[in-house]
Image (tube, helix red, strand yellow):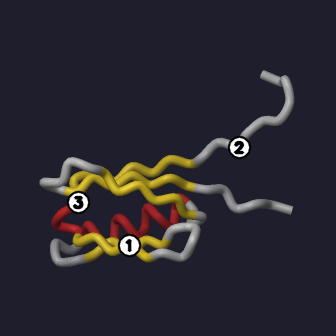
Amino acid sequence: MSYARDVEIRIGIVNTARELVIQTTQSTPELEKAIATALADDKGTLRLEDEKGHIFVVASRTLAFVEIGEEKSRKVGFAP
């Protein structure tokens, strides 16, 4: 049985001091494809859904950066 791994996405938005941080169960390749599609068109949008079903839409022209990081599985016990 495989479990969905959480992926954390950090999005920087132009002229905004804070970052948008989203936890999702979407795979990294799906996210990379969605980001590339959004960046291909200056009038495009990046649409992401978090693990609770909330939908985030960001205009591609306002993206400063997008960072994708998979959450590492947590070890149980005393093993290094």
Q: Earlier in the sequence, mark 3 or mark 2?
A: 3
Q: Position of residue 63 (x, y in %)?
A: 23, 60
- Left or right, 14 with reference to 10: left
User: Which mark identifies residue 73?
Assistant: 2
The type of residue carrying mark 2 is: Ser
State the CA–CA distance, disc 1 to disc 2: 26 Å
User: Which mark identifies residue 6?
Assistant: none
Looking at the rendered structure, the secondary structure element under dot 2 is loop
Judged by depth in the image, the label closer to the viewer, 1 or 2, is 1
Query: Residue 33 sits in which quadrant?
Result: bottom left
Looking at the rendered structure, the secondary structure element under dot 3 is strand
- Left or right, 52 with reference to 79: left
Which residue appears at 39% of the width and 52% of the height? Answer: 10
Which residue appears at 24% of the width and 77% of the height? Answer: 44
Task: Check contact, mark 3 vs mark 2: CB within 8 A.
Answer: no
State the CA–CA distance, disc 3 to disc 2: 29 Å
Query: Residue 26 sits in which quadrant?
Result: bottom right
The type of residue carrying mark 1 is: Phe
Which residue appears at 78% of the width and 22% of the height? Answer: 80
Which residue appears at 39% of the width and 49% of the height? Answer: 67
The type of residue carrying mark 3 is: Leu
- Residue under label 3, please give it: 63
User: Which mark identifies residue 56?
Assistant: 1
| Local crowd size for mark 3, using a 10 Å CA cut-off: few (<14), some (14–19), many (≥20) | some
Looking at the rendered structure, the secondary structure element under dot 1 is strand
State the CA–CA distance, disc 1 to disc 3: 13 Å
Q: Earlier in the sequence, mark 1 or mark 3?
A: 1
Name the residue at the left extreme: 15
